[in-house]
Image: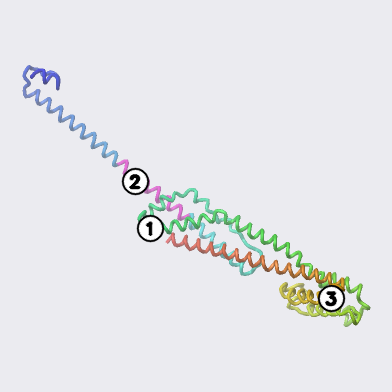
Amino acid sequence: MNSFFNFQFGEFSQTTPNWFDWFSLLSSLIISAASIFLAFYLAERIYKKEKTDKNTEDLDIQNSEVHLFKNSLIELDRAIEKQIVDLQSYIDNKDFKLIFNSAIQVDFLQFVNVKYLYKNAGFNNVEAIEKINNLMISLYTLYDFRESLRDEVRTYLKKYNYHESKFYLYRQLLYTKYFSICNVRAESIIIDQGVKKWKFADDDKFMQRYTELILNTSNDTSIIDNNGLKDRAKLNAKFVVPLISIAFEYVPEDLNAIEINDIGNQVNNAHIDMESITEKHFNVMESYLSNLQSISSKIKLYLV
């Protein structure tokens, strides 16, 4: 019996354990159990507190992320609304004076953790998640918006200026080339009410018709007035195209008619190209406008 207690708990003070020995043994067991329980309890409390603190910290971070995201969206939407107004004015007036809003930028997206947006909306809220996804997709299209818009306008103006330089050949048809031919083919020059006029041979039908067309065009104030050319489309339709037809009737026997016909075709083709690229350009501008309006609507829908 003594050897048993010696092995398990150490030696008792006497050969046969008395009540004090048993009390000491039980006290040790109770204290050990209490210590273990207390340690477990404290560990659990610390774990729960750390977990609560972490949840609170995560919630604070989440709220902060959502708040910053919404503030960025508000600023972005203001810039988009200004650009919408400027784009609409550009499309309506077609004055080639588009204002570019530099505040349209979405660099803030690289700092956005979408996970917090999802958590704030609720992972089980399918409609809210879909709304966020649609918004983010639209926002990412704005990354190169400013540069893309500038490139479109820059390319259009470059092409337009090229064709416009060809269109300006109409001045030769109205003035320089006409006067040059008159000085060669006119039989005489007369002054009629202070206006210098050329008189051509009776059989010079080309120059007679050419001159009549110029007089009619010059007297049409809806086309040309004292300030210069008013309407390019009317000039092309009422002067250039008819002149091409007149000159073509005297091709190939009349060298001057050949030259006038060639210049007229260059002017007419330039006008057609100007109209074509302008139509395409403003169709693209309409798509930019529509995209901005759509993004603005999605931003407002998210912020509600």
Of the pair 194 and 237, the residue shown nearer to us: 237
Pointer 2: what residue? 55
Of the pair 18 and 246, the residue shown nearer to us: 246
**Prevailing SS of the magenta stretch:** helix
- What is the quadrant of residue 162 in the picture? bottom right
Which amino acid, mark 2? Asn
Of the pair 277 and 120, the residue shown nearer to us: 277
Q: Residue at x 40, y 49 (%)?
A: 62
Look at the image and say whether residue 114 sits in the magenta stretch.
no
Q: Disc 2 to disc 3, how far (Cα)?
A: 92 Å
Q: Disc 1 to disc 2, how far (Cα)?
A: 24 Å
Pointer 1: what residue? 126
Pointer 3: what residue? 250
Which amino acid, mark 1? Val
Question: What span is in magenta?
Answer: 49-71
Task: Say above or below: 166 vs 64.
Answer: below
Q: Residue at x 76, y 65 (%)?
A: 166
Residue 147: x, y in percent?
A: 60, 55
Q: Residue at x 81, y 74 (%)?
A: 248
The secondary structure type at the circle numbered 1 is helix
The secondary structure type at the circle numbered 2 is helix
- Relative placement, left or right, of 126 versus 234 is left
Dot 2: few (<14), some (14–19), or many (≥20) neighbours within 10 Å? Answer: few
Residue 139: x, y in percent?
A: 50, 56
Look at the image and say whether residue 68 sits in the magenta stretch.
yes
Dots 1, 3 in contact, CB < 8 A:
no
